[in-house]
Image (spheres, rainbow, N blue to C red):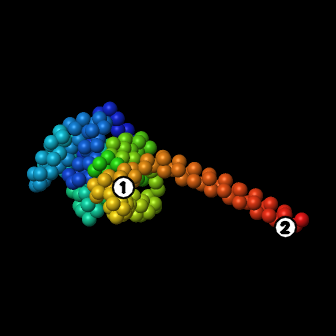
Amino acid sequence: METLPISAESFKVGFIGAGKMAESIARGVVASGMLPPNRISTAVHSNLNRRQVFESFGVNVFSSSEEVVRESDVVIFSVKPQVVKKAITEVRSTLSKDKVLVSVAAGIKLKDLQEWSGQDRFIRVMPNTPAAVGEAASVMSLGTAATEEDGALVTKLFGSVGKMFKADEKMFDAVTGLSGSGPAYIFLAIEALADGGVAAGLPRELALGLASQTRNLPANQAVAARRSSLSEQHKRNAVDSKIVDLRNLNSRK
């Protein structure tokens, strides 16, 4: 059966799971202007606080996950890894090939997601916690029936809370170790820099501000600096090589 494309002009997004990650993505999508909040939905079963959070910026909140799936073209499973199988199987009967399915559950492979859902139009995404402040580094891998157009749509969604990259799923363990765990090491580095500033006589608030801003070196600047460093190293190596050649030549005279 032919996969029907999702209309970029009218598609709706639904979240299975109403936690912090779902909130971060939904807020980012609304703030970027990509979608109005009335085209986004989630389900809250008992936690009234989470209902109030999503309703506060206009998202539709239903009482069941099945309603979310029926109302959505893109369904994002944003639940903890230990409950993702249960979350998928509970709505399996309402899933279809007309919907793009997305999982952000760490460690859950596409083959399992496709088996549990009975659908191959699945995309696995590994975001990280800076999504909460619009600075996520996310990586995606397409399932068997997911198209490049599906990938482009999901890239736009997650692009509203940071940057999206694409990689083969076999790299996801390394991705999790780098960008998934990386923020914790960045925070440690900021704290260590700030401690050094305090030890040198700076007030704690100033030291933290300087350390945090120093950490904000843009990626392209860092890459450019790295390339420049390599270029200079190459030049130094070339000069050193010429010096050695001259010394060898002189030793033969």
Q: Who's the residue at 20% across and 37% down the image?
A: 38
Marker disc for residue 95: none
Amino acid type of the residue that numbered disc 1 sits on in the rendered structure? Ala
User: Residue 78 appears at what percent x and percent y?
Assistant: 27, 54
Q: Does residue 37 appear left or right of residue 244 in this picture?
A: left
Q: Who's the residue at 28% across and 55% down the image?
A: 205
Q: Which residue is mark 2?
A: 251
Viewer-proximal residue among 76 and 191: 191
Q: Residues within 10 Å of mark 1 (few under 14, many from 20)?
A: many
Q: Which residue is mark 1?
A: 211
Residue reaching furthest to the right: 253
Task: Choose the circle earlier in sequence order: 1 or 2.
Answer: 1
On the question of residue 76 being in view, the answer is no
User: Residue 217 appears at what percent x and percent y?
Assistant: 43, 49
Residue reaching furthest to the bottom: 251
Amino acid type of the residue that numbered disc 2 sits on in the rendered structure? Ser
Element under disc 1: helix
Q: Who's the residue at 34% across and 35% down the image?
A: 8
Q: Residues within 10 Å of mark 2 (few under 14, many from 20)?
A: few
Quadrant hosting residue 112? bottom left
